[in-house]
Image (cartoon, rainbow, N blue to C red):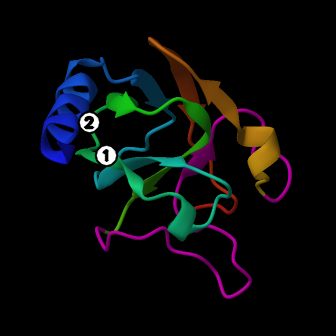
Amino acid sequence: MRRPLLVLAACLAAATPSRAATVEVEVDGIEAGGGAVYVALCQGGLSEAACQDGERARASGGRQRFVLRDVAPGTYALAAFQDMNGNGRLDRTPLGLPLEPYGFSGEGGRNARPDFARAAFPVREPGLALRVRLTRALPPR
C-alpha cells in the first residue's frame, strides 16, 4: 500500500511546474586588457561562501550580458568582478581592498564596504533584469 502512494506522490511532484526565474545581468565598465568577468548570486551575505552560483565569460568589449536561469524565488544580491590576471579570484590588498574591477547590485559597495541588505533584491517569477557597473577601489598598478 505504501509503494503506490510513493509512486503517486512522485508523479504529482514531477507534474508540478518548478518555480524558477531568470535573472538577466548586464555588466558594464569592463576594462580593456582581457581576463574573465564573473557574476554570482549571493544569499545571506557577500562573502565568497555566500556567492557560489553564477557564471563567467571572457571579457569582450566594455559590456557583457549574462543570463542566470532556474533561480529559485528568494532574496539575493549580485556580485561581479573582472579577473584581470586570470587567477580565478578577486585580488585584494592586505587591507582587503579589491585590486581588480568589481561591482554589486543595488547600492552595495559604491561608497563604502559592501552590505548585503543594500545590495539585495527579490527574485520572483518570471525574473528580472539588473545592471552592474564595475569600478575600482584603487587605480590599476
Instruction: Give the magenta-colored segment's residue range.
Output: 86-113
Which of the 4 image quarters holds residue 65?
top left
In the rendered image, residue 58, in percent from the top left (x then y), is placed at 23, 46
Q: Amino acid at mark 2?
A: Ser
Q: Amino acid at mark 1?
A: Glu
Residue at the extreme front of the image, as rendered:
1
96 to the left or right of 49: right
**Residue 102 colored in magenta in the image:** yes
Q: Indicate the quadrant where residue 136 lies.
A: bottom right
Q: Badge 1 is on which residue?
A: 55
Task: Point out the image quarter for the C terminus.
Answer: bottom right
For residue 96, side relative to residue 141 (left or right): right
Asked if residue 35 is positioned above or below residue 58 in the image, the reply reads below
Residue 141 is at least partly visible in this image: no
Mark 1, secondary structure of its residue? strand
Q: Where in the figure is residue 87, as x and y percent of width and height?
A: 31, 74
Q: How many angstroms separate mark 2 from mark 1 (CA)?
A: 15 Å
